[in-house]
Amino acid sequence: MRKNAAKIKNDAKAKEYRRKLAIRKKVIGSAETPRLCVTKTNKHLRVQAIDDVKSVTLFSVQTYGKTKAADTCNAEGAKKVGAAVAVSLKGKKLSKAVFDRSGKQYTGVIKALADSIRENGIQI
């Protein structure tokens, strides 16, 4: 359910939410090209491969839990998570994906993650 962007009091969060909605309007994942949804916090990083047609999460890789790929949420950790995502996509015989940055700016950790996925042979 969409929030009313006018009710978000923090300007930075309101801008991020507006970007998120604009991205989700254009980016749609399918079985052949899943959507790689990135969730970044100060402590952790999570990437989910989602088939929007069936509304199913194919797999997820993060910096915590069962499918832990790295210890930290910095550029080095993002490279390790990106490599793990590429291995998981290749394991499912997928070579393309669409990148959903969830409203985050494409710098730092998000850029390192996307570059790492591309370096490991996945077309974004």
Image (spheres, rainbow, N blue to C red):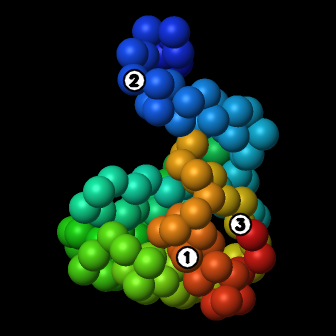
Residue beneath disc 1: 112
**Label 3 to label 2, Cα distance in Å?**
32 Å
Under mark 2, the amino acid is Asn
Q: Residue at x 73, y 46 (%)?
A: 28
Q: Is residue 28 left or right of residue 58?
A: right
Residue at mark 2: 10
Q: Quadrant of residue 115?
A: bottom right
The Cα–Cα distance between marks 2 and 1, rounded to whole angstroms, is 27 Å
What crowding class fits label 1: few (fewer than 14 Cα within 10 Å), some (14-19), or many (20 or more)? many
- Residue 58 to residue 118: above or below: above
Q: Upstream in the sequence, badge 2 or badge 1?
A: 2
Q: Nearer the viewer, residue 25 or 29?
A: 25
Q: Quadrant of the C terminus?
A: bottom right
Task: Say few, some or many: other residues with alpha carbon within 10 Å of mark 3 (under 14 / 14 to 19 / 20 or more).
Answer: many
- Secondary structure at badge 1 equals helix
Q: CA distance from mark 1 to mark 3?
A: 16 Å
Q: Position of residue 19 (x, y in %)?
A: 63, 35
